[in-house]
Image (cartoon, grey):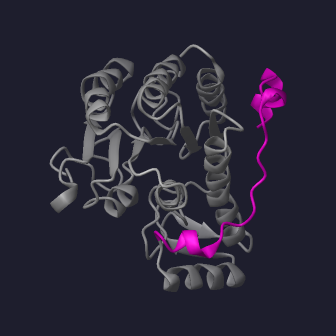
Amino acid sequence: MAGLERSGLLETLVRIKPRPAPRQWLTRVHTSDYLNELKAASRRAPGQLDPDTWISTDSYRVARLSSDGVLKAVDAIVAGKVRNAFVAARPPGHHALPDRAMGLCLLNHVAIAARYIQEKHKLARVLIVDWDVHHGNSTQDVFYDDPSALYFSTHQFPYYLHSGSTQERGRGAGLGTTINSPLSEGSGDAEILKAFEETLIPAADAFQPDFVLISSGFDAHEADPLANLAITTQGYTALTRIVTTIADRHAEGRLVSLLEGGYDLEALTQSTEAHLRVLMSVDH
């Protein structure tokens, strides 16, 4: 946020204020028992939910605010108030399982948003593009047998969670609507752009989404300390152009990007700014 303020971008953006997301939308993805446990754990905090995930007294409330930030962004887009949106929120979400926290994540905001788009706004087909360096295991699981959501992920493989192989393609009616394009250690712009151009674009053109969501983790950046991919800031600009073009072609530009990982503050700032400049541009 400080970086966006320094760049002058912050003052040009439409700010959307969230409230804690209504429980009815959280339970489209998460179990009632888990939500009760999460609320109770936050009251007892501080504490640890798994080896990577800690909780504070504010965690449950903030996670609900983060989910609602995505829902309010969706509403603003459907109402025509904004063309697209970037949700700068913490904690991230794409590892949070329906019944437990995982990998820094408490609520799966992108999955909740996808169900909200389908049920509240009657937009049937949702594309979820996940370029976080870690595989979005929970997002994949939620939609694994659901043909109404196309989940596409690039991620370092093998790496944390060890899920996301090319063999994981969906199940039953959802077979083929899960697409993993794993990247080997050291991969950079050329490799990830190839996956987007040769795999994502034709899949999205065949699927014809009504709405596009991005799990926008910037931890595949070459400067990020947690993993070993080498995406540049310019690479994220190119990825954003590809996904916005898909949204323009099929979804009337309807796109929400939400922040997932990113652990080098300078790289996170630069990547977010580059990402936003594409989202804000008239000509993608």
| Image spot of residue 133 (x, y percent) | 42, 41
| Image spot of residue 10 (x, y percent) | 80, 31
- Specify the farthest residue to the top: 283
Return the residue nearer the eye: 144 or 82.
Answer: 82
**Highlighted magenta segment, given as a residue range:** 1-29
| Image spot of residue 269 (x, y percent) | 67, 30
Q: Is residue 16 above or below residue 105?
A: above
| 144 with respect to 232 (left or right) | left
Residue at image position (52%, 34%) is 224
Residue at image position (61%, 33%) is 268
For the question of whether residue 175 can be seen, the reply is yes
Figure quadrant of residue 57: bottom right
Residue 277 sits inside the magenta stretch: no
Return the residue nearer the eye: 126 or 185.
Answer: 126
Q: Quadrant of the N terminus?
A: top right
| 30 with respect to 79 (left or right) | left
| 218 with respect to 246 (left or right) | right
For the question of whether residue 262 can be seen, the reply is no
Figure quadrant of residue 65: bottom right
Return the residue nearer the eye: 80 or 15.
Answer: 80
Residue at image position (57%, 13%) is 283
Residue 16 sits inside the magenta stretch: yes
| 58 with respect to 127 (left or right) | right
Residue at image position (52%, 36%) is 218
How many numbered discs, if any?
0
| Image spot of residue 159 (x, y percent) | 32, 47
